[in-house]
Amino acid sequence: MWRILEMRKQLYIFIISVVLVIQINLLAQTDQQSNSRDIPQNPQLQPDIDAVPDTLDFGEVVVLDDSLQQLLILNIGTQNLIIDDLGIVGNNDTLFSVVNPPQLPVTILPGDTLALTVRFAPLSPGNKSAFLVITNNDPDSNPLFVILKGRAVLPDIFVTPTALNFGDVVVGTSASLSIQISNTGVGNLIVSDLDILGANAGEFEVTSSPPLPIVIAPGAPPEQIEITLSPDSMGIKSAFLSIVSNDPDENPVFISLSGVGTEARITSSIAQINFGDVWVGEDSLTSFQIWNEGNIDLVITSLGLVGTNSDQFSLPQLPNLPITLAPFADTLELFVSFNPTTLGIKNAQIEFQSNDPNDNPYFVDLSGRGVLPDIAANPPTVTFDSVLVGDSAFVILQIQNTGTAPLTISDTSLIGSHRGLFEVKTLPQLPVIIPPDGNFIQVELKFTPDSVGLKTATLQFFSDDPDENPLLVDLFGDAVQADIATQPNPVQFGKVRVGSDSVLTVQILNTGSATLSVFDTLL
């Protein structure tokens, strides 16, 4: 088979040479010599071949790549055009080929066209050429020669540096580095795509580049590409820059990208401190710790109290600022005190200013309630109404805690000029603690008067109420007694005749302060 192809190739070369000689000789021959050719009987009826274009120029094609061009074979004559053979000859004939050639022979009717696709697939750099030889029945263009040519190029991409290490980059900031792309080959280097791939591709970005595609001629100045790392979290970051080009043996080129996202990360042992109930005028002290869970030094530049009730809290023993805490090594202990001056819930915050990019400022919430007990008597005064001398009366007194802290009653006592007529009959064992918010105890009081009249005393309750200690409950007793009298007294009948009688009326009066009951009379 190889020998047949070689003989065919030599035959085409020979035919080309002969045809060129014949064309030269035809110009010099006389009419008589021209009559020696085989001329059709009717010169108006003959096929006429034409090729569009008459030269296929493939331009620059990268080595080991290929390029396709279309060639049109036209029959502009008046008889059927018959294509008997298609062949490619010349120094670089093996680099050109007809793609899916038609089955030969093929007939092209007058006015019709045959489309051929020709491929150029160079294997080495340089200018390449050949001829497409079309054997046909056109009496004056047989064979027809179409020039095939192209330039095989071999661009060679060169990138420096081949890796970018951004080092430490603080989270929330950016750092940029550049690479340069050069063409050390033959023919234009075409960079068609720049893409970032890998685990942390989203944190790297091509931030400066010529518009794509980037065309770099051989020996031209390098093109600069800028890549930026903007870490959004702490830790090692890695990705690759993929450079897609027409370099036949280095496509794509991968550039390693790496860096470390760094941040200081302030952390506290507790996010909220609740002091609970603290008596007004007293203080409660606690402490907590601050440390750095980042991977660079945490620098605290200021800290202080802010918020609605910041004046109710204090920070004793503050360190000198700024203070630096190494990652997972240093710990700062802070003390905070709650000093309520009024009743009620108090809120504030400790504010830290630092180089933490995510929590700046950082807050620790503070809360507490200022409380006090508040003693009250119900009723506020005790009255014993109309108690007979020698009898006893009883009244129940409630002692309440209307405050917000437990109330402790430690002792009681009776004072006043008539204190002996009053008595605390029943009372819980002292000391007694009364819970806040309206809770109470009951105290039973007794009044036993020994004479008529208003009797008074005061019952004292000693407790931890800061502004009513002792609590004074006034006791009033109205001692009453009936007092019988007659009028007239004595009763004077005067002189009465014997055997006669005299009647006088005697009034029984109650001159006392209690009801008089008369049960009987005797003479």
Image (cartoon, grey):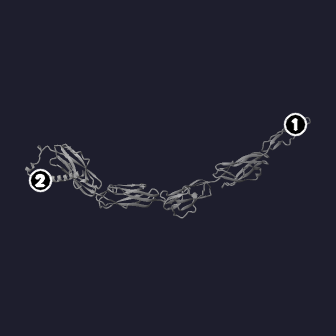
Residue at the top extreme? 499
Amino acid carrying mark 2 in the image: Asn
Which secondary structure, mark 2? helix
Q: Is residue 284 left or right of residue 297?
A: right
Q: Mark 1 = which residue?
A: 502
Which secondary structure, mark 1? loop
Viewer-proximal residue among 135 and 387? 135
Q: CA distance from mark 2 to mark 1?
A: 205 Å
Viewer-proximal residue among 347 and 476? 347
Q: Position of residue 263 (x, y in %)?
A: 47, 59
Residue at the right extreme? 498
User: Which of marks 1 and 2 precedes in the sequence?
Assistant: 2
Q: Position of residue 407 (x, y in %)?
A: 67, 52
- The answer to whether marks 2 and 1 mark residues whose Cβ atoms lie closer than 8 Å is no
Amino acid carrying mark 1 in the image: Ser
Q: Mark 2 = which residue?
A: 25
**Quarter of the figure with the C terminus:** top right
Q: Position of residue 175 (x, y in %)?
A: 41, 60
